Amino acid sequence: MTDLTLYSMPSSGNSYKVRLMLALLGRPYAHVGLEHETPEIEKAHADGILPLGKLPVLELADRTRIPESDAILVYLTKDTKWLPEDPNELAEVLGWMFWEQNQHEGVIAVRAALLTYESRAHLATPERMAELLERGHAVLSFMETRLADHDWLALDRPTVADICLYAYTHSAGTKGGFDMTRFPAINAWIDRVAALPGHIRLEDIPE
């Protein structure tokens, strides 16, 4: 038995980061996989399962539903080693998570989505893809500079910020077409995250 139910989109990095965090924490949960533009997702909307209209959503035992991937991550990691209590350290961690949503996800994830989902293919104009490629390399260069002399993004140990940024970064080359050979420090960091006990891959979907 578990007191958690996760509604997630299996192919989405935002959903993956929550599944990965649950695995690293060793937290059991029930998984409900949903895809866009399907009867199941429409029913979820109609039933009020998606408070902000998108996935993922974590449902608690009392039927409280927590939307937004990074909010879920903070909820799950409170009082764990992944989320520091010290205010200065907490600010560092949250700063990277905010940066992921307002600088990173809207470029790295969007380019991958345009290349992955047929329903968005019409948006993948040469101009748009070139712009996202240039902006994405700039975003990755920012991470590269940080990781060139730090093992982890926020602190001297892995935190929830690393899991947050890992979700879309680890597949930026394969899904987004970014040139990851330019970022050796990021690649080393990706390997460190993948070596964490309990790590699961994007394609490891609970039954």
Image (cartoon, rainbow, N blue to C red):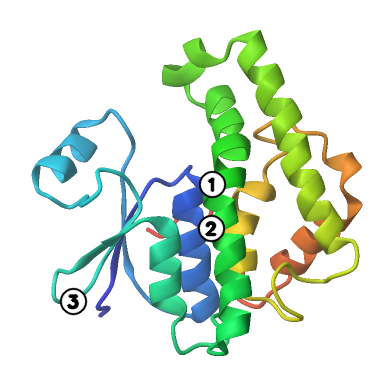
Q: Residue at 82% of width from left, 34% of height from top? A: 179
- Crowd band around label 1 with a 10 angstrom C-alpha radius: few (<14), some (14–19), many (20+): few
Secondary structure category for the residue under label 1: helix
- Crowd band around label 3 with a 10 angstrom C-alpha radius: few (<14), some (14–19), many (20+): few
Q: Does 99 appear above or below 123?
A: below
Q: Which residue is mark 3?
A: 61
Q: Which of marks 2 and 3 precedes in the sequence? A: 3
Q: Is residue 51 left or right of residue 26?
A: left
Q: Residue furthest left?
A: 47
- Crowd band around label 2 with a 10 angstrom C-alpha radius: few (<14), some (14–19), many (20+): some
Q: Does 42 appear above or below 104?
A: above
> Nearest the camera: 78 or 199?
78
Q: Which residue is mark 1?
A: 102
Residue 67 position within the rendered picture, expressed as x and y whole percent measured from the top left: 30, 57
- The amino acid beneath tag 3 is Ala
Q: Is residue 80 left or right of residue 46?
A: right
> Nearest the camera: 5 or 82?
82
Residues marked 1 and 2 touching at CB (< 8 Å): yes
- The amino acid beneath tag 1 is Asn
Q: Which residue is mark 2?
A: 98
Q: Residue at 53% of width from left, 89% of height from top? A: 85
Residue 5 position within the rendered picture, expressed as x and y whole percent measured from the top left: 27, 66
Viewer-side label of 3, 2: 2
Is residue 187 visible to the viewer in this orientation of the structure? no
Is residue 63 visible to the viewer in this orientation of the structure? yes
Q: Does 69 appear above or below 181?
A: below
* Separation of marks 3 and 1 at Cα, in angstroms: 31 Å
